[in-house]
Amino acid sequence: MPSLSPSLDELVDALKRLPGLGPRSASRIAEHLLSEDRTRAVKLLASLERAVKTVKHCELCNTLTDEAVCPICADQTRDRTKICVVESPADQRVIEETMAYRGLYYVLMGLVSPVKGIGAEELHLTKLLERVKNDAAVREVLIATPFTPEGDATAHFIAKAMASVAPAVRVTRLARGIPAGVELEYTDANTIAGAIFGRK
């Protein structure tokens, strides 16, 4: 059957490349925006264009922010002796919601995955190592990567690298209160808080 709308097909194809969206979900979203809610589609387009122009990586922690340095890194009341390493801004947000952690962060924007060709350089781990090595205030690096093969490999790599560049810095990992194979983003706040307090 020939395509009824190449433009719609192109939109669906773009949407289904987003994490968590398959062809059916992408198709439903595209059709909803174009058939029932064009005002919302225009607002979405404007928000996306604005975000693409203004959102950047924090110079210190690598998270997404509108400023050169994000509000958490700029907050002088945070515990500057601790850096929590997370996979994504979504994981950072979840940890913040627990109110169990008041230190700083480093956001990897991914995990080590040889299969996908993602290594230390792609995750900018050198930036994290330099930060810990050159900041005498840092006493602990808390690794909060997910308990998946990629998360475990990333945690192992970071721990090994930290031992060589900053042996005096304590390296910890979230306690196993978070189920194996579960993404941090989808874990409830109480479980994450317990894992933070139970880290070892």
Image: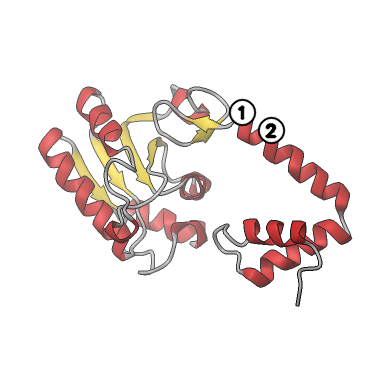
Is residue 200 visible in the rendered image? The answer is: no
Q: Give the secondary structure at mark 1.
A: helix
Is residue 26 visible in the rendered image? The answer is: yes
Q: Residue at x 30, y 61 (%)?
A: 115
Indicate left or right for 170 with 47 as reference: left
The 10 Å Cα crowd at callout 1, few under 14, some 14 to 19, many 20 or more, is few
Q: How is the image coloured?
A: secondary structure
Q: Specify the quadrant of the image occupied by residue 24.
A: bottom right
Indicate left or right for 166 with 23 as reference: left
> Which of the two residues, 119 or 199, is positioned nearer the viewer here?
119
Discs 1, 2 touching: Cβ within 8 Å: yes
Percent x, y for residue 50?
69, 33
Q: Residue at x 71, y 62 (%)?
A: 9
> Which of the two residues, 136 or 4, is positioned nearer the viewer here?
4
Q: Give the secondary structure at mark 2.
A: helix
Where does label 1 land, which residue?
Answer: 54
Vertical placement of 137 versus 164: above or below? above
